[in-house]
Image (spheres, helix red, strand yellow):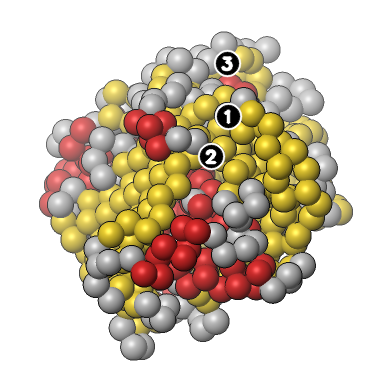
């Protein structure tokens, strides 16, 4: 088969696993597992009489992924005057091939003694610069201030639907239910790293058994647990607690990736680990190779997941999703003609695709400079041509195709010129929005002839869609800025999730990927390619760098 080595586009890797893991590990915070407490522990009693501004709990855990230590998780609960503060810090590393990526996630939740939310914060370092979000709870709404590149963005949102518990109150409530001998404990809560998305936590008491912790065998009570996301996705795990109700170990998997949380000594919080490889191990090998994938214009696939359900995939733009059964579906991709966008004509329905966020800040002066330079020779009314000019500009501006960036914002990438497919995707979305073109990003898969020592594989990928007037109507059009001039997209792009990447929705928008990781099978049914051009298209000016 023809070999297409991504020598100039090393972006066809797996940035999405990094983002997804960072957004999912909050489920392992001990505060999220508060429902496992059985009797009232001595630590809990201490909290009732603790003086002001003192730590009343501190829990340290080793985070294991794919059977090897990847990082640490530390959660503290403090009395601060009349309020209670719950803070967590998770540090871990992953590898893409031999490239190591270090990730830091910190959260804080402040509440009153009776469980009224006051504020919460989230700080994530997925690239070289941190992204910070602060939520201040009012009587009717929440004020959100998001900062990236030192530029705050302030928005307001309604309070999350009632009935959810703040972290410290959830701990107390679950402990009381367990103390009463409840066999099943159910409550809803939120976590700062997951924004304002309410999740339901379910705990079912199981048998007593012996487990190994720190090389020693200890008695533990097993609890079967489930987290029900706001999207309806259900994530199941198992937890083991000691006789005082302290979490000793938890175990879960998302997709085919196993994850454990193991209780550790406080001194372990300073340790560093070399995490597992999460790129090559999650490539998907289809049943047959695809010839000339970059020229493919129409493709049909059958997607299946092993031992589970296949989530609904997007059926918009050039993709049509048709379910076969719970675990499989047909996906047809047309890179030539996109479908009419359903219900996208009202200005309010387009607002989220034009707004700025910390990841996609269309107001940034550097982004405006790049976008203006890219379209200066293209007439204002030619939206499709302007979108393509912006795509080519991003391809040329990111002149270092690197795998060691976790998930950089558009503002950061505009200045650094460094990144993989996620950086290409968000920078293009920001430049499109700056020019008044609605844009969103797509998480999915793309086919590669050869990459990272593997041949004929699908790798997880990110690209952009723009809403453009074309052939008599508005259509979402795929634009992949990691591909060179002359190749805006192709039919080997399989969309799994689309998102505006508004602040607070990064993790929830990626959850559709979870059931696929390590479990997806792809059958290639048929393909249509365009004739090979005699001469390669000439690159267009990329504008200011």
Whether residue 510 appears in this view of the structure is no
Q: Is residue 268 left or right of residue 436?
A: right
Q: Earlier in the sequence, mark 3 or mark 1?
A: 1
Residue 330: image x %, image y %? Answer: 78, 47
| Residues tagged 3 and 1 counted as in contact (Cβ below 8 A) | no
Q: CA distance from mark 3 to mark 2?
A: 41 Å
Q: Earlier in the sequence, mark 3 or mark 2?
A: 2
Residue 430: image x %, image y %? Answer: 30, 52
Element under disc 3: strand
Q: Nearer the viewer, residue 95 or 484?
A: 95
Badge 1: how crowded within 10 Å, few (<14), some, or many (20+)? few
| Residues tagged 2 and 1 counted as in contact (Cβ below 8 A) | yes
Residue 208: image x %, image y %? Answer: 78, 49
Q: CA distance from mark 2 to mark 1?
A: 8 Å
Q: Is residue 157 left or right of residue 246?
A: left
Residue at the far bottom: name it.
139
The residue under label 3 is: 450
Badge 3: how crowded within 10 Å, few (<14), some, or many (20+)? some
């Amino acid at each position: 088969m023809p070999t297409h080595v991504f020598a100039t586009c090393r972006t066809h890797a797996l940035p999405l696993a990094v983002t997804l893991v960072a957004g999912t590990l909050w489920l392992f915070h001990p505060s999220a597992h508060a429902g496992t407490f059985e009797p009232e522990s001595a630590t809990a009693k201490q909290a009732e009489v603790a003086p002001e501004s003192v730590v009343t709990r501190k829990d340290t855990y080793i985070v294991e992924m794919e059977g090897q230590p990847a990082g640490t998780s530390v959660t503290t609960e403090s009395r601060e005057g009349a309020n209670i503060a719950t803070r967590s810090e998770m540090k871990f590393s992953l590898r893409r091939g031999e490239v190591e990526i270090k990730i830091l996630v910190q959260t804080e939740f402040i509440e009153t003694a009776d469980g009224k939310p006051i504020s919460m914060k989230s700080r994530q370092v997925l690239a070289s610069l941190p992204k910070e979000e602060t939520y201040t709870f009012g009587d009717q709404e929440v004020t959100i201030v998001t900062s990236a590149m030192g530029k705050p963005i302030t928005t307001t949102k309604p309070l999350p639907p009632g009935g959810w518990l703040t972290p410290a109150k959830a701990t107390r409530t679950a402990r009381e239910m367990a103390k009463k001998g409840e066999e099943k404990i159910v409550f809803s809560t939120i976590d700062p790293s997951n924004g304002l998305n309410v999740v339901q936590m379910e705990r079912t008491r199981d048998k007593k058994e012996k487990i190994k912790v720190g090389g020693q065998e200890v008695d533990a009570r097993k609890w079967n647990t489930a987290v029900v996301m706001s999207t309806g996705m259900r994530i199941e795990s198992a937890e083991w607690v000691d006789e005082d109700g302290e979490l000793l170990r938890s175990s879960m998997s998302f997709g085919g990736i196993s994850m454990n949380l193991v209780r550790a000594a406080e001194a372990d919080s300073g340790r560093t680990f070399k995490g597992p490889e999460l790129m090559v191990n999650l490539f998907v090998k289809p049943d047959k190779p695809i010839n000339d994938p970059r020229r493919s214009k129409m493709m049909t696939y059958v997607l299946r997941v092993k031992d589970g359900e296949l989530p609904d995939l997007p059926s918009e733009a050039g993709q049509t999703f048709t379910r076969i059964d719970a675990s499989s579906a047909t996906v047809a991709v047309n890179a030539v003609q996109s479908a009419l966008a359903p219900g996208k004509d009202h200005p309010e329905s387009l607002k989220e695709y034009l707004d700025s966020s910390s990841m996609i800040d269309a107001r940034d002066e550097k982004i405006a400079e790049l976008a203006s330079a890219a379209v200066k020779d293209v007439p204002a009314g030619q939206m499709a041509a302007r979108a393509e000019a912006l795509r080519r500009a991003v391809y040329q501006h990111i002149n270092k195709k690197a795998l060691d960036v976790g998930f950089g914002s558009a503002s950061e990438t505009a200045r650094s010129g460094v990144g993989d497919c996620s950086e290409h995707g968000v920078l293009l979305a920001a430049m499109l929005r700056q020019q008044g073109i609605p844009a969103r990003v797509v998480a999915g898969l793309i086919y590669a002839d050869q990459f990272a020592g593997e041949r004929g594989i699908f790798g997880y990928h990110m690209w952009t869609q723009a809403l453009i007037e074309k052939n008599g109507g508005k259509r979402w059009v795929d634009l992949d800025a990691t591909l060179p001039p002359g190749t805006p997209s192709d039919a080997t792009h399989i969309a799994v999730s689309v998102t505006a990447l508004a602040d607070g929705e990064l993790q929830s928008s990626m959850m559709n990927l979870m059931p696929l990781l390590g479990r997806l099978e792809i059958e290639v049914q048929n393909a249509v390619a365009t004739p090979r051009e005699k001469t390669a298209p000439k690159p267009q000016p990329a504008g200011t760098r």
